[in-house]
Every structure is written in structure tokens, then in C-alpha cells.
Image (cartoon, rainbow, N blue to C red):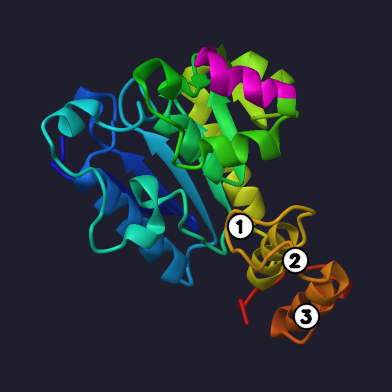
Amino acid sequence: MSDTAVLYEVRDGVAVLTFNRPEAMNAVNAALATAAGDALAQASADPQVRAVVLTGNGRAFCAGADLKAVARGEPIVDDAHPERGFAGIVQHWVDKPVIAAVNGFAMGGGTEIMLACDLVVAADTAVFGLPEVKRGLIAGGGGVIRMQRQLPMKRALELALTGDGIEAQTALDWGLVNRVVPAEQVLDAALELARKIAENAPLSVQYTKQAIYRTQTALSEWDPAWGAEDPWAVNELLGAKVLTSADALEGPTAFAQKRKPDWQGK
């Protein structure tokens, strides 16, 4: 077992980041927050990476903040990059799609990491929730912000105020996750979804993601300016960047020639 708090590898254009503190149910300490933030930045900067998958080693995805470390007075953040937020992830904008492969327990900060991801594939053993109120805390890593954006208000309030968890199938029924699969298939299913995305034109994917977040009806949690912009102006701006790219010519050409596109990402 590696001593690295987060394992990093690239598979067929997909960066896989694995939380690697199984003995602590992948609870977030300073080492994990630093390693996760750096790995996400590495994936973002690598032109060969077109999608990112986050998962956990062992039976948990992430048990949230390392409360034992907190009780000892130890920091659980990356002091060098506080702007990245909890776990180095929840306020860390990445143009490329980020998929959570939730392999098990994901309460508290684990749920907040999931909420920060673009897509979620959950194991049928996964459990989600915001139990902070049971500990005299608040879900300040994006839980109280994102839960009410991604669920109907009364659903969000029930989770946030009771602190109770919900199982994967309930999360699927509520629209909080995209897919539920047997636990042993969760990483493969997430990789399959990531590879399907990675087959598409990189700039098209990146600017489509950005356009969706920038034109939310409410102010975006990613950027205070987003959501206040004219959505059609954003659409025109990002659309022009895509349509003037080499890939915008390659796509129709490949279609006409009945061959697979050779995307350049520029």
C-alpha cells in the first residue's frame, strides 16, 4: 500500500484520483487535502486528460473531515491553497468533467465532495448525508449551498436538518446521483461514462460544462459573477470559442469521410 494520501493514474485519457486513507475511511486530513488538490490541478493542466474520476480505496468513498485530527488541533486543509476549499476539491474549478465513483460510505464531507462533482456513479452500498448538525457543526464545505441547488428545497432541508443519511437508491430516485451499480462495478461504470465523454471534442466538452454552470438561474457557487451574466451573451462567447476551433472543422469533416475524428483540443 502506498503512503500517498491520493493515488493518481491516467487511463485512456481519464485521470483517476483515489483517496488512499482506507484505515481512516478516507477522512480528510491536511495530507489528503493537499494531495487531492494537487492531483486535480495536474489533471486540469494535462492536455491528454479529458475527464477525471474520483474514488476511494477500501469500503468508504470519504467519511468527511478527520475529526480525530481536528480534536488533536491538527489542520485538515491545504495551507498553500485555501482557495481550493475542503479536501482541495469543493471550490476547485476544473474545466474538464469530474465524475465521482462513490464506492461506499460518503457522509458529511464525502457528500460535499460528491455534490461538487459533475456526475455521480454510486455503488449500491453507498450512503449519503450531512450529519454535521449531530456534531454541533455545519456543512460548510458546500453542503448547505449545493444540496438545495441539486434537490427540491424540502428534500434538502430534511437531509441538512435531521443529519440522517440516505441510501444510494434513494439518492438516485431523488436525482442526486446519475447511476447506481453493484459495488464491485462502480469504478468500471464511472470509467465507462468518463471514456464516453472523453471521445468527444475536448473544447466542446469543456466550454459546454462552463456554459451550463455560468448560465444557472441562481448565482453560481463556483464564481460570484456567474449567474448574473446574460445567458445568451455567455452562449455566444463560449460558442464562438468552440466554432472557431480546429475541432469544429474536424468534426464535420470526419463525419463526411465516415471516420473517427482526430481531436486536437484547439
**Amino acid type of disc 2?**
Ala
The residue that appears at 63% across and 68% down in the rendered structure is: 202
Would you say the residues marked 1 and 3 are in contact, meaning their CB atoms lie under 8 Å apart? no
Real-space CA distance between mark 1 and mark 2, rounded to the nearest whole angstrom? 30 Å
Which element type, helix, strand or loop, lies under badge 1? helix
Q: Is residue 157 magenta?
A: yes
Label whose residue precedes the other's in the sequence (1 or 3): 1
Q: Residues within 10 Å of mark 1 (few under 14, many from 20)?
A: many
Foreground of the two, 200 or 227: 227
Foreground of the two, 62 or 246: 62
Measured along the vertical axis of the image, is residue 216 above or below residue 254?
above
Q: Is residue 1 visible?
A: yes
Residue at image mark 3: 237
Q: Which mark is residue 228?
A: 2
Q: Mark 1 against mark 3, which lies toward the viewer?
A: 3
Tell me which segment is drawn in magenta: 154-165
Q: Indicate the quadrant containing the C terminus: top left, top right, bottom left or bottom right.
A: bottom right
Would you say the residues marked 3 and 2 are in contact, meaning their CB atoms lie under 8 Å apart? no
Which element type, helix, strand or loop, lies under badge 2? loop
Foreground of the two, 53 or 164: 164
Q: Is residue 105 visible?
A: no
Q: Going by the image, does 181 lie left or right of 238?
A: left
Label whose residue precedes the other's in the sequence (1 or 2): 1
Q: Which mark is residue 230?
A: none
Residue at image mark 1: 198
Q: Residues within 10 Å of mark 2 (few under 14, many from 20)?
A: some
Q: Going by the image, does 120 lie left or right of 154?
A: left
**Amino acid type of disc 3?**
Leu
